[in-house]
Amino acid sequence: MPISKKSSTKRSSAKKSGAKKSSARKTTLRKSASRKSASATRTAGKGLMKPMQPDAKLAVIVGARKMPRTEITKKVWAYIKRYELQDPKNRRMINADSKLQQVLGGKKRVSMFEMAKLVSQHIKP
């Protein structure tokens, strides 16, 4: 009979640790829910979502109204894809047409990373 007593103590300790795990999960869920609500209350106009004004050269490609950097980047990429300006062999390189060349400082070919840097020079708050 002593064997059964040991197994029963193991079971009771297992039940206790199981209870601790479920309560830990609940607190984790509560914390993540509070984080989501905090991020949902962020307002437009701060950080990446701050409306920026493209200059005249960039406005030819993306439009003249104020918009966040993320939207400007999306519109530049849409322009590149629409006119098939990405190099088919090396997709990281952009072959600029005359309009995009104005934005890229007169360069005919730039990498996508350099393009982001050059486009940011044409955006003002």
Image (cartoon, rainbow, N blue to C red):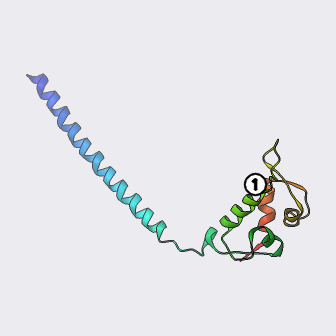
Image spot of residue 113 (x, y percent)? 77, 55
Image spot of residue 11 (x, y percent)? 18, 34
| Quarter of the rendering occupied by the C terminus | bottom right
Q: Residue at x 40, y 64 (%)?
A: 34
Considering depth in this image, is 22 or 9 the residue closer to the camera? 22
Q: Secondary structure at mark 1?
A: helix
For residue 84, above or below residue 106: above
| Quarter of the rendering occupied by the N terminus | top left
Image spot of residue 30 (x, y percent)? 35, 59
Image spot of residue 13 (x, y percent)? 21, 38
For residue 111, above or below residue 38: above
For residue 54, above or below residue 89: below
Side of 11 relative to 72 (left or right):
left
Considering depth in this image, is 72 or 13 the residue closer to the camera? 72
Please, what is the three-letter code of the amino acid marked with disc 1? Lys
Side of 121 relative to 13 (left or right):
right
- Residue 36 image-quadrant placement: bottom left
Q: Which residue is mark 1?
A: 81
